[in-house]
């Protein structure tokens, strides 16, 4: 290899190296997002092994908390249930991924569903962790908007990173 070819190769390497490093960091972040998405799926699927138990909702409230930027809403549900002959009171977990940061329309839908089930002849079903019967939830549905977002973004980013790496390798 001639001296000028070595210099050209060195210049290209120095220019491309920061981009390759940034690309590898981006790939690592993308894989982390994908891992979190898959963990959410597996955690939700594990909830389907929990026991279905009749429950009674003692209190159900749709609370609005005025904030300086926007009104936050939150659902408060207190319920009790009996599992293996023992009654558990003051349970208040709606679902494992429920937070007051959810959009208002999503929380209103959950509230309407819980209120309808509370007043129906069939009653309410809660899902009890058989290993820890004090742990129960009222909803075990997957949070599809969050899963869809991370499920689309992670593969798209990973594909883009791989395409760029292939392009760099070919040129």
Image: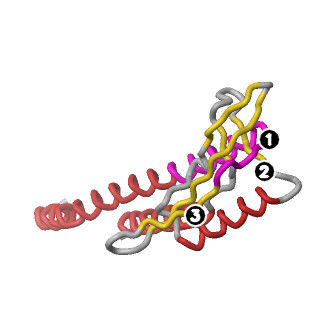
Residue 136 sits above or below residue 106 on the image: above
**Residue 20 part of the magenta segment:** no
Q: Position of residue 31 (x, y in %)?
A: 46, 53
Q: Determine the CA span between mark 1 and mark 2.
A: 10 Å
Q: Quadrant of residue 16?
A: bottom left
Q: Quadrant of residue 111?
A: bottom right
**Who comes first in sequence, dot 1 or dot 2?**
1
The residue that disc 2 covers is 124
Front residue of this view, candidates 14 and 45: 45
**Residue 121 numbered mark, or none:** none
- Boundaries of the magenta span: 35-59
Mark 3 or 1: in front is 3
Mark 1 or 2: in front is 2
Q: Position of residue 110 (x, y in %)?
A: 66, 63
- Mark 1 nearby-residue class (10 Å; few <14, some 14–19, many ≥20): some
**Residue 62 numbered mark, or none:** 3
Please report contact status of discs 1 and 2: CB closer than 8 Å, yes or no. no
Which residue sits at x=79%, y=39%?
Answer: 53
Q: Determine the CA span between mark 3 and mark 2.
A: 18 Å
Quarter of the image where the C terminus is located: bottom left
**Residue 52 numbered mark, or none:** 1
Front residue of this view, candidates 109 and 165: 109
Identify the secondary structure beneath mark 3: strand
Colouring of the image = secondary structure
- Mark 2 nearby-residue class (10 Å; few <14, some 14–19, many ≥20): many
Mark 3 or 2: in front is 3
**Who comes first in sequence, dot 3 or dot 2?**
3
Q: Determine the CA span between mark 3 and mark 1.
A: 25 Å
């Amino acid at each position: 290899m001639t001296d000028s070819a070595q210099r050209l190769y060195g210049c290209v390497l120095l220019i491309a190296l920061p981009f390759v490093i940034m690309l590898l960091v981006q790939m690592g972040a993308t894989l982390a997002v994908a891992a979190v998405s898959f963990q959410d799926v597996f955690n939700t699927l594990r909830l389907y092994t929990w026991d279905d138990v009749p429950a009674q909702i003692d209190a159900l409230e749709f609370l609005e908390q005025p904030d300086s930027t926007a009104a936050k809403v939150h659902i408060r549900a207190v319920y009790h249930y009996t599992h293996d002959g023992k009654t558990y009171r003051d349970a208040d977990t709606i679902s494992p991924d429920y937070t007051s940061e959810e959009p208002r329309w999503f929380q209103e839908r959950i509230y309407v569903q819980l209120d309808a089930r509370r007043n129906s002849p069939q009653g309410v079903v809660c899902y009890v962790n058989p290993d820890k019967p004090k742990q129960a939830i009222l909803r075990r549905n997957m949070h599809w908007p969050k899963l869809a977002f991370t499920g689309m973004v992670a593969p798209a980013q990973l594909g883009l990173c791989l395409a760029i790496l292939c392009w760099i390798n070919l040129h």
